[in-house]
Protein backbone atom coordinates (compact mmCIF):
# COMPACT_ATOMS: atom_id res chain seq x y z
CA UNK A 1 0.00 0.00 0.00
CA UNK A 2 1.66 3.23 -1.16
CA UNK A 3 0.53 6.63 0.09
CA UNK A 4 -0.21 9.18 -2.62
CA UNK A 5 0.16 12.18 -0.29
CA UNK A 6 2.54 14.69 -1.86
CA UNK A 7 6.09 14.29 -0.44
CA UNK A 8 6.66 16.60 2.51
CA UNK A 9 9.67 17.42 4.65
CA UNK A 10 8.80 18.12 8.28
CA UNK A 11 9.97 17.06 11.72
CA UNK A 12 8.63 13.51 11.19
CA UNK A 13 9.05 12.98 7.45
CA UNK A 14 12.00 13.16 5.09
CA UNK A 15 12.28 13.64 1.35
CA UNK A 16 15.12 13.69 -1.13
CA UNK A 17 14.43 14.86 -4.68
CA UNK A 18 16.61 12.89 -7.13
CA UNK A 19 16.13 15.37 -10.00
CA UNK A 20 19.29 15.92 -12.00
CA UNK A 21 21.41 14.13 -14.56
CA UNK A 22 20.87 10.38 -14.65
CA UNK A 23 22.54 7.71 -16.76
CA UNK A 24 20.43 6.51 -19.66
CA UNK A 25 20.41 3.78 -22.24
CA UNK A 26 17.75 2.64 -24.67
CA UNK A 27 17.04 -1.09 -24.82
CA UNK A 28 15.33 -1.74 -28.19
CA UNK A 29 15.83 -5.52 -28.00
CA UNK A 30 14.85 -5.86 -24.33
CA UNK A 31 18.14 -7.43 -23.29
CA UNK A 32 18.63 -5.23 -20.22
CA UNK A 33 17.05 -7.53 -17.66
CA UNK A 34 18.91 -10.64 -18.88
CA UNK A 35 22.17 -8.69 -18.92
CA UNK A 36 21.52 -7.19 -15.46
CA UNK A 37 21.60 -3.58 -16.60
CA UNK A 38 20.08 -2.76 -13.20
CA UNK A 39 23.62 -3.19 -11.86
CA UNK A 40 25.36 -1.12 -14.55
CA UNK A 41 24.50 0.22 -18.01
CA UNK A 42 26.95 -0.94 -20.71
CA UNK A 43 27.21 2.34 -22.68
CA UNK A 44 25.17 5.03 -20.96
CA UNK A 45 24.53 8.59 -22.07
CA UNK A 46 23.34 11.43 -19.82
CA UNK A 47 19.73 12.50 -19.48
CA UNK A 48 17.79 15.03 -17.41
CA UNK A 49 15.16 13.86 -14.93
CA UNK A 50 12.45 15.08 -15.06
CA UNK A 51 12.06 15.40 -18.82
CA UNK A 52 10.82 13.44 -21.81
CA UNK A 53 13.67 11.58 -23.46
CA UNK A 54 12.45 12.37 -27.01
CA UNK A 55 13.53 16.02 -26.91
CA UNK A 56 16.93 15.45 -25.29
CA UNK A 57 18.95 13.48 -27.85
CA UNK A 58 18.50 13.58 -31.60
CA UNK A 59 18.50 9.79 -31.87
CA UNK A 60 15.62 9.54 -29.38
CA UNK A 61 12.99 11.72 -31.00
CA UNK A 62 10.82 8.90 -32.31
CA UNK A 63 12.12 6.25 -29.92
CA UNK A 64 9.20 4.90 -27.93
CA UNK A 65 10.34 1.47 -26.72
CA UNK A 66 12.20 0.51 -23.53
CA UNK A 67 14.99 2.54 -21.94
CA UNK A 68 16.89 2.49 -18.65
CA UNK A 69 17.51 5.27 -16.16
CA UNK A 70 20.12 4.80 -13.44
CA UNK A 71 21.36 6.95 -10.58
CA UNK A 72 23.13 6.61 -7.23
CA UNK A 73 21.93 8.27 -4.05
CA UNK A 74 23.18 8.35 -0.47
CA UNK A 75 20.57 8.17 2.25
CA UNK A 76 21.04 10.73 5.04
CA UNK A 77 22.06 8.99 8.28
CA UNK A 78 19.26 10.78 10.14
CA UNK A 79 16.75 8.64 8.25
CA UNK A 80 17.88 5.43 9.98
CA UNK A 81 14.96 3.68 11.67
CA UNK A 82 12.43 5.03 9.16
CA UNK A 83 10.67 3.19 6.38
CA UNK A 84 12.25 4.17 3.10
CA UNK A 85 10.22 4.57 -0.09
CA UNK A 86 11.01 5.41 -3.67
CA UNK A 87 8.33 7.59 -5.31
CA UNK A 88 8.07 8.18 -9.06
CA UNK A 89 5.88 11.13 -10.10
CA UNK A 90 5.29 9.91 -13.66
CA UNK A 91 6.96 7.20 -15.71
CA UNK A 92 5.49 6.97 -19.17
CA UNK A 93 4.48 4.24 -19.69
CA UNK A 94 5.43 0.99 -17.93
CA UNK A 95 8.10 0.99 -15.23
CA UNK A 96 10.19 -1.67 -13.48
CA UNK A 97 12.25 -0.47 -10.54
CA UNK A 98 15.40 -1.98 -9.00
CA UNK A 99 17.24 -0.86 -5.87
CA UNK A 100 20.76 -2.19 -5.30
CA UNK A 101 20.13 -5.01 -7.74
CA UNK A 102 16.78 -6.15 -6.29
CA UNK A 103 13.58 -5.58 -8.23
CA UNK A 104 11.18 -3.70 -5.95
CA UNK A 105 8.10 -3.34 -8.16
CA UNK A 106 6.41 -2.55 -11.44
CA UNK A 107 3.81 0.01 -12.47
CA UNK A 108 1.65 0.51 -15.53
CA UNK A 109 0.37 3.91 -16.66
CA UNK A 110 1.97 7.31 -17.23
CA UNK A 111 1.09 10.62 -15.49
CA UNK A 112 0.26 9.36 -11.99
CA UNK A 113 2.59 8.75 -9.04
CA UNK A 114 3.55 5.37 -7.64
CA UNK A 115 6.12 4.03 -5.24
CA UNK A 116 7.47 1.11 -3.28
CA UNK A 117 8.74 0.39 0.21
CA UNK A 118 12.44 -0.27 -0.38
CA UNK A 119 13.48 -0.50 3.31
CA UNK A 120 14.83 -4.09 3.11
CA UNK A 121 17.05 -3.19 0.16
CA UNK A 122 18.72 0.06 1.15
CA UNK A 123 22.34 0.64 2.17
CA UNK A 124 23.52 3.12 4.78
CA UNK A 125 27.27 2.85 4.20
CA UNK A 126 27.33 3.26 0.41
CA UNK A 127 25.29 4.96 -2.29
CA UNK A 128 22.04 3.28 -3.30
CA UNK A 129 21.89 2.21 -6.92
CA UNK A 130 18.48 2.98 -8.39
CA UNK A 131 17.54 1.66 -11.84
CA UNK A 132 14.23 2.24 -13.62
CA UNK A 133 13.36 0.62 -16.92
CA UNK A 134 10.67 2.65 -18.66
CA UNK A 135 8.87 1.04 -21.60
CA UNK A 136 6.71 3.25 -23.79
CA UNK A 137 6.04 0.75 -26.58
CA UNK A 138 2.98 1.99 -28.48
CA UNK A 139 0.50 -0.86 -28.00
CA UNK A 140 -3.22 -1.07 -28.50
CA UNK A 141 -3.81 -2.65 -25.06
CA UNK A 142 -2.33 0.37 -23.28
CA UNK A 143 -4.02 3.57 -22.09
CA UNK A 144 -4.03 5.61 -24.23
CA UNK A 145 -3.79 3.06 -27.03
CA UNK A 146 -0.81 3.35 -29.38
CA UNK A 147 0.32 1.55 -32.51
CA UNK A 148 -3.17 2.14 -33.84
CA UNK A 149 -4.73 5.26 -35.32
CA UNK A 150 -7.71 7.33 -34.21
CA UNK A 151 -10.91 5.33 -34.00
CA UNK A 152 -8.91 2.12 -34.01
CA UNK A 153 -7.85 2.12 -37.63
CA UNK A 154 -5.35 3.85 -39.85
CA UNK A 155 -6.03 6.29 -42.62
CA UNK A 156 -4.16 8.83 -44.69
CA UNK A 157 -4.66 11.18 -41.73
CA UNK A 158 -2.71 8.93 -39.31
CA UNK A 159 0.64 10.30 -38.30
CA UNK A 160 4.04 8.98 -37.28
CA UNK A 161 4.59 7.75 -34.57
CA UNK A 162 1.22 6.02 -34.85
CA UNK A 163 -1.11 6.89 -32.00
CA UNK A 164 -4.86 7.02 -31.42
CA UNK A 165 -4.52 10.52 -30.01
CA UNK A 166 -3.39 13.92 -31.23
CA UNK A 167 -0.31 14.67 -29.12
CA UNK A 168 3.26 13.44 -29.26
CA UNK A 169 3.81 10.14 -27.41
CA UNK A 170 6.49 11.55 -25.13
CA UNK A 171 8.28 8.99 -22.97
CA UNK A 172 10.40 8.67 -19.87
CA UNK A 173 10.62 9.89 -16.30
CA UNK A 174 8.55 13.02 -16.79
CA UNK A 175 8.24 14.10 -13.16
CA UNK A 176 10.50 13.92 -10.12
CA UNK A 177 11.76 10.74 -8.54
CA UNK A 178 11.99 11.03 -4.76
CA UNK A 179 13.29 9.01 -1.85
CA UNK A 180 11.16 9.39 1.26
CA UNK A 181 11.70 8.41 4.88
CA UNK A 182 8.44 7.89 6.76
CA UNK A 183 7.81 6.90 10.39
CA UNK A 184 6.92 3.22 10.92
CA UNK A 185 3.36 4.28 11.78
CA UNK A 186 2.36 7.14 9.49
CA UNK A 187 -0.53 9.01 7.93
CA UNK A 188 -1.44 7.13 4.80
CA UNK A 189 -4.34 9.16 3.47
CA UNK A 190 -6.39 12.25 4.30
CA UNK A 191 -9.80 13.14 2.85
CA UNK A 192 -11.24 16.62 3.31
CA UNK A 193 -14.76 17.81 2.56
CA UNK A 194 -15.97 21.33 3.18
CA UNK A 195 -19.36 23.01 3.62
CA UNK A 196 -20.43 26.39 4.89
CA UNK A 197 -23.45 28.21 6.27
CA UNK A 198 -24.17 31.93 6.01
CA UNK A 199 -25.62 33.77 9.01
CA UNK A 200 -25.98 37.46 9.78
CA UNK A 201 -22.73 37.21 11.68
CA UNK A 202 -20.79 35.88 8.69
CA UNK A 203 -19.85 32.59 7.12
CA UNK A 204 -19.12 29.50 9.20
CA UNK A 205 -17.03 26.89 7.42
CA UNK A 206 -17.23 23.20 8.22
CA UNK A 207 -14.23 21.02 7.47
CA UNK A 208 -14.76 17.27 7.67
CA UNK A 209 -11.54 15.31 7.77
CA UNK A 210 -10.99 11.59 7.67
CA UNK A 211 -7.54 10.14 8.21
CA UNK A 212 -6.18 6.70 7.56
CA UNK A 213 -2.88 5.34 8.83
CA UNK A 214 -0.71 2.74 7.17
CA UNK A 215 -1.07 0.29 10.06
CA UNK A 216 -3.68 -0.69 12.65
CA UNK A 217 -3.10 2.37 14.80
CA UNK A 218 -5.41 2.73 17.84
CA UNK A 219 -4.07 5.88 19.53
CA UNK A 220 -4.94 9.55 19.42
CA UNK A 221 -4.24 12.31 16.91
CA UNK A 222 -5.28 15.87 16.17
CA UNK A 223 -6.53 18.04 13.35
CA UNK A 224 -6.17 21.82 13.41
CA UNK A 225 -6.96 24.78 11.13
CA UNK A 226 -6.41 28.41 12.00
CA UNK A 227 -6.28 27.88 15.78
CA UNK A 228 -9.34 25.57 15.80
CA UNK A 229 -8.44 22.00 16.68
CA UNK A 230 -10.00 18.69 17.53
CA UNK A 231 -8.76 15.37 18.91
CA UNK A 232 -8.99 12.28 16.71
CA UNK A 233 -9.44 8.80 18.18
CA UNK A 234 -8.14 6.16 15.81
CA UNK A 235 -9.67 2.73 15.64
CA UNK A 236 -7.95 0.21 13.41
CA UNK A 237 -6.07 3.01 11.70
CA UNK A 238 -9.09 5.21 10.91
CA UNK A 239 -10.46 8.39 12.46
CA UNK A 240 -12.80 11.21 11.52
CA UNK A 241 -13.19 14.72 12.86
CA UNK A 242 -14.93 18.00 12.06
CA UNK A 243 -13.75 21.57 12.51
CA UNK A 244 -15.99 24.59 12.52
CA UNK A 245 -14.31 27.79 11.31
CA UNK A 246 -15.98 31.08 12.28
CA UNK A 247 -15.81 33.99 9.81
CA UNK A 248 -14.52 31.65 7.15
CA UNK A 249 -13.09 33.00 3.91
CA UNK A 250 -14.42 30.98 1.01
CA UNK A 251 -12.20 29.74 -1.82
CA UNK A 252 -12.94 30.67 -5.45
CA UNK A 253 -11.60 32.45 -8.55
CA UNK A 254 -10.56 35.97 -7.54
CA UNK A 255 -10.40 34.98 -3.85
CA UNK A 256 -8.39 31.76 -3.63
CA UNK A 257 -8.11 31.71 0.14
CA UNK A 258 -6.28 28.65 1.42
CA UNK A 259 -6.20 27.33 4.97
CA UNK A 260 -3.51 25.05 6.32
CA UNK A 261 -4.86 21.84 7.79
CA UNK A 262 -2.41 20.16 10.17
CA UNK A 263 -2.91 16.50 11.02
CA UNK A 264 -0.87 14.80 13.75
CA UNK A 265 -0.65 11.20 14.79
CA UNK A 266 0.46 11.40 18.42
CA UNK A 267 4.25 11.33 18.54
CA UNK A 268 4.39 9.36 15.32
CA UNK A 269 3.70 11.62 12.36
CA UNK A 270 2.36 14.92 11.12
CA UNK A 271 1.28 16.30 7.74
CA UNK A 272 0.01 19.67 6.54
CA UNK A 273 -2.33 20.20 3.64
CA UNK A 274 -3.49 23.40 1.94
CA UNK A 275 -7.26 23.29 1.68
CA UNK A 276 -10.01 25.65 0.54
CA UNK A 277 -13.50 25.98 1.97
CA UNK A 278 -15.87 25.82 -0.96
CA UNK A 279 -18.83 23.92 -2.34
CA UNK A 280 -19.56 22.90 -5.90
CA UNK A 281 -22.89 21.74 -7.31
CA UNK A 282 -24.72 21.15 -10.58
CA UNK A 283 -28.35 22.25 -10.35
CA UNK A 284 -30.64 22.27 -13.36
CA UNK A 285 -28.61 23.58 -16.27
CA UNK A 286 -26.12 25.66 -14.26
CA UNK A 287 -22.92 25.13 -12.27
CA UNK A 288 -22.69 26.61 -8.77
CA UNK A 289 -19.60 27.47 -6.81
CA UNK A 290 -20.32 28.47 -3.21
CA UNK A 291 -24.05 28.60 -4.08
CA UNK A 292 -23.49 31.20 -6.83
CA UNK A 293 -23.86 30.38 -10.54
CA UNK A 294 -20.49 30.30 -12.25
CA UNK A 295 -19.42 30.38 -15.88
CA UNK A 296 -16.08 28.86 -16.78
CA UNK A 297 -13.75 30.57 -19.24
CA UNK A 298 -10.55 28.96 -20.32
CA UNK A 299 -8.87 26.26 -22.33
CA UNK A 300 -7.98 22.70 -22.96
CA UNK A 301 -4.26 22.59 -22.29
CA UNK A 302 -1.32 20.24 -22.65
CA UNK A 303 1.86 19.70 -20.71
CA UNK A 304 4.17 20.43 -23.62
CA UNK A 305 7.21 22.56 -24.28
CA UNK A 306 10.33 22.47 -26.43
CA UNK A 307 13.24 20.73 -24.72
CA UNK A 308 11.35 19.38 -21.74
CA UNK A 309 8.61 17.71 -23.83
CA UNK A 310 5.95 16.54 -21.39
CA UNK A 311 8.47 16.74 -18.52
CA UNK A 312 7.78 18.92 -15.50
CA UNK A 313 8.92 22.42 -16.39
CA UNK A 314 8.15 24.68 -13.43
CA UNK A 315 9.08 28.03 -15.04
CA UNK A 316 6.78 27.33 -18.01
CA UNK A 317 4.02 26.22 -15.65
CA UNK A 318 4.29 29.45 -13.64
CA UNK A 319 4.31 31.45 -16.87
CA UNK A 320 1.16 29.64 -18.04
CA UNK A 321 -0.71 30.61 -14.89
CA UNK A 322 0.40 34.18 -15.44
CA UNK A 323 -0.93 34.07 -19.01
CA UNK A 324 -4.20 32.52 -17.81
CA UNK A 325 -4.59 35.51 -15.49
CA UNK A 326 -3.58 37.95 -18.25
CA UNK A 327 -6.17 36.58 -20.65
CA UNK A 328 -8.87 36.47 -17.98
CA UNK A 329 -9.37 32.68 -17.85
CA UNK A 330 -10.70 31.06 -14.68
CA UNK A 331 -10.51 27.41 -15.65
CA UNK A 332 -8.92 24.65 -17.75
CA UNK A 333 -9.20 20.94 -18.47
CA UNK A 334 -6.16 18.73 -17.98
CA UNK A 335 -6.46 17.31 -21.49
CA UNK A 336 -5.75 14.39 -21.93
CA UNK A 337 -4.08 13.02 -18.79
CA UNK A 338 -3.46 14.03 -15.17
CA UNK A 339 -1.10 17.01 -14.88
CA UNK A 340 1.65 17.44 -12.32
CA UNK A 341 0.84 17.81 -8.64
CA UNK A 342 2.51 21.24 -8.78
CA UNK A 343 0.06 22.31 -11.51
CA UNK A 344 -2.81 21.45 -9.16
CA UNK A 345 -1.14 23.34 -6.29
CA UNK A 346 -0.85 26.40 -8.54
CA UNK A 347 -4.54 26.15 -9.48
CA UNK A 348 -5.44 26.10 -5.77
CA UNK A 349 -3.27 29.15 -5.11
CA UNK A 350 -4.52 31.13 -8.10
CA UNK A 351 -8.19 30.23 -7.99
CA UNK A 352 -8.34 28.32 -11.27
CA UNK A 353 -11.10 25.69 -11.64
CA UNK A 354 -9.97 22.37 -13.03
CA UNK A 355 -11.72 19.63 -14.95
CA UNK A 356 -9.34 16.81 -14.08
CA UNK A 357 -8.99 14.19 -16.82
CA UNK A 358 -7.65 10.62 -16.81
CA UNK A 359 -5.46 9.31 -19.68
CA UNK A 360 -8.52 7.63 -21.26
CA UNK A 361 -8.20 9.11 -24.73
CA UNK A 362 -8.46 7.09 -27.94
CA UNK A 363 -10.99 4.54 -26.62
CA UNK A 364 -12.95 2.75 -29.34
CA UNK A 365 -15.46 0.04 -28.55
CA UNK A 366 -15.26 -2.02 -31.70
CA UNK A 367 -11.77 -3.14 -30.60
CA UNK A 368 -11.26 -6.82 -29.76
CA UNK A 369 -13.27 -7.45 -26.52
CA UNK A 370 -10.10 -8.48 -24.66
CA UNK A 371 -8.60 -5.05 -25.46
CA UNK A 372 -11.77 -3.23 -24.38
CA UNK A 373 -11.72 -5.22 -21.11
CA UNK A 374 -8.07 -4.29 -20.54
CA UNK A 375 -8.84 -0.63 -21.25
CA UNK A 376 -11.63 -0.76 -18.70
CA UNK A 377 -9.28 -2.14 -16.02
CA UNK A 378 -6.74 0.56 -16.81
CA UNK A 379 -9.45 3.26 -16.75
CA UNK A 380 -10.59 2.07 -13.32
CA UNK A 381 -7.02 2.11 -12.00
CA UNK A 382 -6.33 5.59 -13.41
CA UNK A 383 -9.65 6.99 -12.11
CA UNK A 384 -9.04 5.60 -8.62
CA UNK A 385 -5.46 6.87 -8.46
CA UNK A 386 -6.34 10.30 -9.86
CA UNK A 387 -9.16 10.78 -7.37
CA UNK A 388 -6.97 9.66 -4.47
CA UNK A 389 -4.17 12.02 -5.59
CA UNK A 390 -6.27 15.13 -6.33
CA UNK A 391 -9.39 14.84 -4.12
CA UNK A 392 -8.28 17.49 -1.62
CA UNK A 393 -7.61 20.24 -4.15
CA UNK A 394 -10.34 22.90 -4.01
CA UNK A 395 -9.51 23.70 -7.66
CA UNK A 396 -10.84 20.36 -8.92
CA UNK A 397 -14.57 20.57 -9.60
CA UNK A 398 -15.04 17.59 -11.92
CA UNK A 399 -13.49 14.33 -13.04
CA UNK A 400 -13.39 13.69 -16.77
CA UNK A 401 -13.22 9.93 -17.17
CA UNK A 402 -12.53 9.97 -20.93
CA UNK A 403 -11.92 12.13 -23.97
CA UNK A 404 -13.70 11.37 -27.23
CA UNK A 405 -14.56 7.70 -26.87
CA UNK A 406 -15.99 6.43 -30.14
CA UNK A 407 -18.34 3.58 -30.85
CA UNK A 408 -16.80 2.43 -34.06
CA UNK A 409 -14.85 3.59 -37.01
CA UNK A 410 -13.79 7.18 -36.93
CA UNK A 411 -15.58 7.88 -40.18
CA UNK A 412 -18.63 5.60 -39.97
CA UNK A 413 -20.25 5.45 -36.52
CA UNK A 414 -22.28 2.25 -35.97
CA UNK A 415 -26.01 2.04 -35.42
CA UNK A 416 -27.44 2.51 -31.89
CA UNK A 417 -28.30 -1.20 -31.66
CA UNK A 418 -24.78 -2.38 -32.55
CA UNK A 419 -22.63 -4.10 -29.89
CA UNK A 420 -19.96 -1.35 -30.04
CA UNK A 421 -22.57 1.27 -29.28
CA UNK A 422 -24.01 -0.71 -26.35
CA UNK A 423 -20.59 -1.75 -25.02
CA UNK A 424 -19.52 1.88 -25.07
CA UNK A 425 -22.59 2.94 -23.10
CA UNK A 426 -21.97 0.21 -20.52
CA UNK A 427 -18.26 0.98 -20.26
CA UNK A 428 -18.85 4.70 -19.69
CA UNK A 429 -21.83 4.26 -17.36
CA UNK A 430 -19.87 1.87 -15.13
CA UNK A 431 -16.89 4.20 -15.02
CA UNK A 432 -19.07 7.23 -14.24
CA UNK A 433 -20.80 5.33 -11.44
CA UNK A 434 -17.46 4.22 -10.01
CA UNK A 435 -16.05 7.77 -10.00
CA UNK A 436 -19.23 9.12 -8.35
CA UNK A 437 -19.02 6.48 -5.66
CA UNK A 438 -15.38 7.35 -4.96
CA UNK A 439 -16.12 11.09 -4.82
CA UNK A 440 -19.74 12.17 -4.43
CA UNK A 441 -18.65 15.79 -3.90
CA UNK A 442 -17.70 16.49 -7.51
CA UNK A 443 -19.20 16.24 -10.97
CA UNK A 444 -18.30 13.39 -13.31
CA UNK A 445 -18.26 13.78 -17.06
CA UNK A 446 -16.44 12.87 -20.27
CA UNK A 447 -15.72 14.91 -23.39
CA UNK A 448 -17.68 13.72 -26.40
CA UNK A 449 -16.55 13.91 -30.00
CA UNK A 450 -18.79 14.91 -32.88
CA UNK A 451 -19.34 11.23 -33.70
CA UNK A 452 -19.64 10.04 -30.06
CA UNK A 453 -23.30 9.03 -29.63
CA UNK A 454 -25.10 11.66 -27.57
CA UNK A 455 -27.04 8.86 -25.82
CA UNK A 456 -23.84 8.16 -23.88
CA UNK A 457 -24.36 11.43 -21.98
CA UNK A 458 -27.32 9.99 -20.04
CA UNK A 459 -25.43 9.70 -16.72
CA UNK A 460 -22.95 12.59 -16.78
CA UNK A 461 -23.51 15.55 -14.44
CA UNK A 462 -22.80 17.98 -17.22
CA UNK A 463 -22.27 17.50 -20.92
CA UNK A 464 -18.86 18.17 -22.45
CA UNK A 465 -18.72 18.45 -26.22
CA UNK A 466 -15.67 18.93 -28.42
CA UNK A 467 -16.90 20.71 -31.53
CA UNK A 468 -15.06 21.86 -34.63
CA UNK A 469 -17.64 23.79 -36.61
CA UNK A 470 -15.68 25.99 -38.97
CA UNK A 471 -12.71 23.62 -38.98
CA UNK A 472 -13.20 19.85 -39.42
CA UNK A 473 -16.81 20.47 -40.26
CA UNK A 474 -17.76 23.27 -42.69
CA UNK A 475 -14.21 24.59 -42.83
CA UNK A 476 -14.01 28.08 -44.28
CA UNK A 477 -17.78 28.63 -43.99
CA UNK A 478 -18.38 30.82 -41.00
CA UNK A 479 -22.14 31.61 -41.19
CA UNK A 480 -23.25 27.95 -41.73
CA UNK A 481 -20.85 26.84 -38.96
CA UNK A 482 -22.37 29.33 -36.58
CA UNK A 483 -25.89 28.15 -37.44
CA UNK A 484 -25.00 24.46 -37.07
CA UNK A 485 -23.33 25.02 -33.69
CA UNK A 486 -26.37 26.95 -32.43
CA UNK A 487 -28.77 24.29 -33.66
CA UNK A 488 -26.82 21.46 -32.06
CA UNK A 489 -26.46 23.19 -28.68
CA UNK A 490 -30.16 24.01 -28.65
CA UNK A 491 -31.07 20.39 -29.41
CA UNK A 492 -28.69 18.99 -26.76
CA UNK A 493 -30.07 21.35 -24.16
CA UNK A 494 -33.66 20.47 -25.06
CA UNK A 495 -32.85 16.76 -24.86
CA UNK A 496 -30.94 16.71 -21.56
CA UNK A 497 -31.57 20.00 -19.73
CA UNK A 498 -28.07 19.76 -18.27
CA UNK A 499 -25.31 22.37 -18.32
CA UNK A 500 -23.23 22.19 -21.50
CA UNK A 501 -19.51 22.62 -21.48
CA UNK A 502 -17.96 23.29 -24.86
CA UNK A 503 -14.76 21.53 -23.91
CA UNK A 504 -13.03 22.08 -27.27
CA UNK A 505 -13.51 24.40 -30.23
CA UNK A 506 -11.07 26.34 -32.36
CA UNK A 507 -9.04 26.49 -35.52
CA UNK A 508 -5.42 25.80 -36.49
CA UNK A 509 -3.67 29.13 -36.94
CA UNK A 510 -0.23 29.97 -38.21
CA UNK A 511 1.04 32.86 -36.10
CA UNK A 512 1.73 35.76 -38.45
CA UNK A 513 -0.56 34.57 -41.25
CA UNK A 514 -3.24 37.12 -42.04
CA UNK A 515 -6.20 37.26 -44.41
CA UNK A 516 -9.04 39.64 -45.08
CA UNK A 517 -11.68 38.31 -45.56
CA UNK A 518 -10.67 35.73 -42.94
CA UNK A 519 -9.42 32.41 -44.28
CA UNK A 520 -8.59 29.10 -42.64
CA UNK A 521 -5.15 29.08 -40.92
CA UNK A 522 -5.08 32.88 -40.58
CA UNK A 523 -5.19 34.71 -37.26
CA UNK A 524 -8.34 36.54 -38.39
CA UNK A 525 -10.12 33.24 -39.03
CA UNK A 526 -9.28 31.91 -35.55
CA UNK A 527 -10.66 35.14 -34.09
CA UNK A 528 -13.93 34.76 -36.03
CA UNK A 529 -14.38 31.10 -35.06
CA UNK A 530 -13.81 31.85 -31.39
CA UNK A 531 -16.05 34.91 -31.53
CA UNK A 532 -19.17 33.19 -32.90
CA UNK A 533 -18.90 30.45 -30.27
CA UNK A 534 -18.48 32.95 -27.42
CA UNK A 535 -21.38 35.08 -28.71
CA UNK A 536 -23.72 32.09 -28.60
CA UNK A 537 -22.54 31.12 -25.11
CA UNK A 538 -22.99 34.67 -23.80
CA UNK A 539 -26.62 34.59 -24.89
CA UNK A 540 -27.31 31.11 -23.44
CA UNK A 541 -26.44 30.71 -19.76
CA UNK A 542 -26.84 26.91 -19.94
CA UNK A 543 -23.52 26.96 -21.79
CA UNK A 544 -21.64 26.84 -18.50
CA UNK A 545 -18.14 26.78 -19.88
CA UNK A 546 -16.18 27.66 -22.98
CA UNK A 547 -12.79 25.95 -23.20
CA UNK A 548 -10.91 26.91 -26.33
CA UNK A 549 -8.71 24.30 -27.93
CA UNK A 550 -5.92 24.98 -27.18
CA UNK A 551 -4.11 27.27 -24.77
CA UNK A 552 -0.88 26.93 -26.78
CA UNK A 553 0.37 25.23 -29.93
CA UNK A 554 1.68 21.76 -29.08
CA UNK A 555 3.71 18.91 -30.53
CA UNK A 556 2.01 16.02 -32.26
CA UNK A 557 3.04 13.12 -34.45
CA UNK A 558 4.11 14.13 -37.97
CA UNK A 559 1.38 13.95 -40.58
CA UNK A 560 -0.39 15.74 -43.36
CA UNK A 561 -2.80 17.61 -41.08
CA UNK A 562 -0.08 18.68 -38.63
CA UNK A 563 2.28 21.25 -40.14
CA UNK A 564 5.74 20.90 -38.58
CA UNK A 565 4.45 18.11 -36.33
CA UNK A 566 2.38 20.66 -34.44
CA UNK A 567 -1.25 21.24 -33.60
CA UNK A 568 -1.56 24.99 -34.21
CA UNK A 569 -4.88 25.64 -32.48
CA UNK A 570 -3.16 27.48 -29.64
CA UNK A 571 -4.18 31.04 -28.89
CA UNK A 572 -0.56 31.30 -27.78
CA UNK A 573 2.31 29.90 -29.79
CA UNK A 574 4.32 27.04 -28.30
CA UNK A 575 6.77 29.61 -26.91
CA UNK A 576 3.83 31.47 -25.34
CA UNK A 577 3.46 34.51 -27.62
CA UNK A 578 -0.13 35.71 -28.04
CA UNK A 579 -1.89 35.34 -31.38
CA UNK A 580 -4.67 37.83 -32.25
CA UNK A 581 -7.18 35.48 -30.59
CA UNK A 582 -5.47 35.90 -27.21
CA UNK A 583 -6.10 39.65 -27.41
CA UNK A 584 -9.74 39.01 -28.38
CA UNK A 585 -10.16 36.82 -25.30
CA UNK A 586 -8.51 39.38 -23.06
CA UNK A 587 -10.87 42.06 -24.36
CA UNK A 588 -13.88 39.86 -23.52
CA UNK A 589 -12.73 38.09 -20.36
CA UNK A 590 -10.75 40.59 -18.29
C1 LIG B 1 -10.08 16.69 -30.65
C2 LIG B 1 -9.17 16.01 -29.63
C3 LIG B 1 -7.88 16.77 -29.39
C4 LIG B 1 -7.30 17.20 -30.71
C5 LIG B 1 -8.29 18.09 -31.42
C6 LIG B 1 -7.75 18.60 -32.76
O1 LIG B 1 -9.85 15.82 -28.40
O2 LIG B 1 -6.99 15.96 -28.66
O3 LIG B 1 -6.05 17.81 -30.56
O4 LIG B 1 -9.42 17.34 -31.67
O5 LIG B 1 -7.88 17.87 -33.74
O6 LIG B 1 -10.81 15.78 -31.35
O7 LIG B 1 -7.19 19.67 -32.80
Image (cartoon, rainbow, N blue to C red):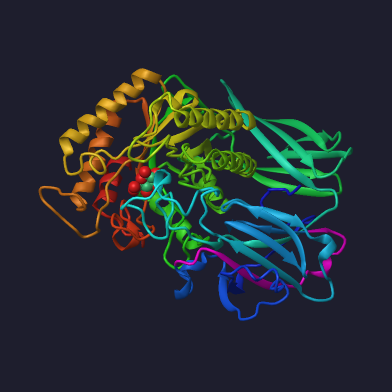
**Looking at the image, which residue is at 57% across and 56% down?**
93
Q: Quadrant of residue 371?
A: top right
Q: Is residue 208 above or below residue 387?
A: above
Coordinates of residue 139 in the picture (x, y in percent): 52, 53
* Residue 524 belongs to magenta span: no
**Looking at the image, which residue is at 27% across and 51% down?**
508
Q: Is residue 449 above or below residue 178?
A: above
Coordinates of residue 65 in the picture (x, y in percent): 54, 64
Nearer to us in this view, 266 or 249: 266
* Residue 81 belongs to magenta span: yes
Nearer to us in this view, 40 or 139: 139
Coordinates of residue 232 in the picture (x, y in percent): 81, 35
**Looking at the image, which residue is at 89% across and 37% down?**
218
Whether residue 204 appears in this view of the structure is no
Q: Quadrant of residue 61?
A: bottom left
Range covered by the magenta-colored residues: 62-84
Amino acid sequence: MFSLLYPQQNSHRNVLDLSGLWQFQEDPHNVGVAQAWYNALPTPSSIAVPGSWNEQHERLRDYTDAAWYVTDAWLPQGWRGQRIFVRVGSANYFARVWVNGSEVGTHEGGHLPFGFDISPHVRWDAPNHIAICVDNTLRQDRLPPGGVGMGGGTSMLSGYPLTSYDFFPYAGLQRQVWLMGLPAVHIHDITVNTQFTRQNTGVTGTIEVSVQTNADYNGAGTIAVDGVSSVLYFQNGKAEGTLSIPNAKLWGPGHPHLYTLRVTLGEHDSYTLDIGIRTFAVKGDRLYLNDEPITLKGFGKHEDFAGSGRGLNLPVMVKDYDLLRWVGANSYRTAHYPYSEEAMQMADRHGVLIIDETPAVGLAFQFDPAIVKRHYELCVQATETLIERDKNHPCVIAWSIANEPVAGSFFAPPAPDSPAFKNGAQFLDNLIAHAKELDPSRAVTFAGMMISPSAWFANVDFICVNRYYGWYSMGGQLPPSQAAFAAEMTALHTQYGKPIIVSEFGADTVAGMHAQPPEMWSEEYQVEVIKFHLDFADAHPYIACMHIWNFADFKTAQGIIRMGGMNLKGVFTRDRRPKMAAHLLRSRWV
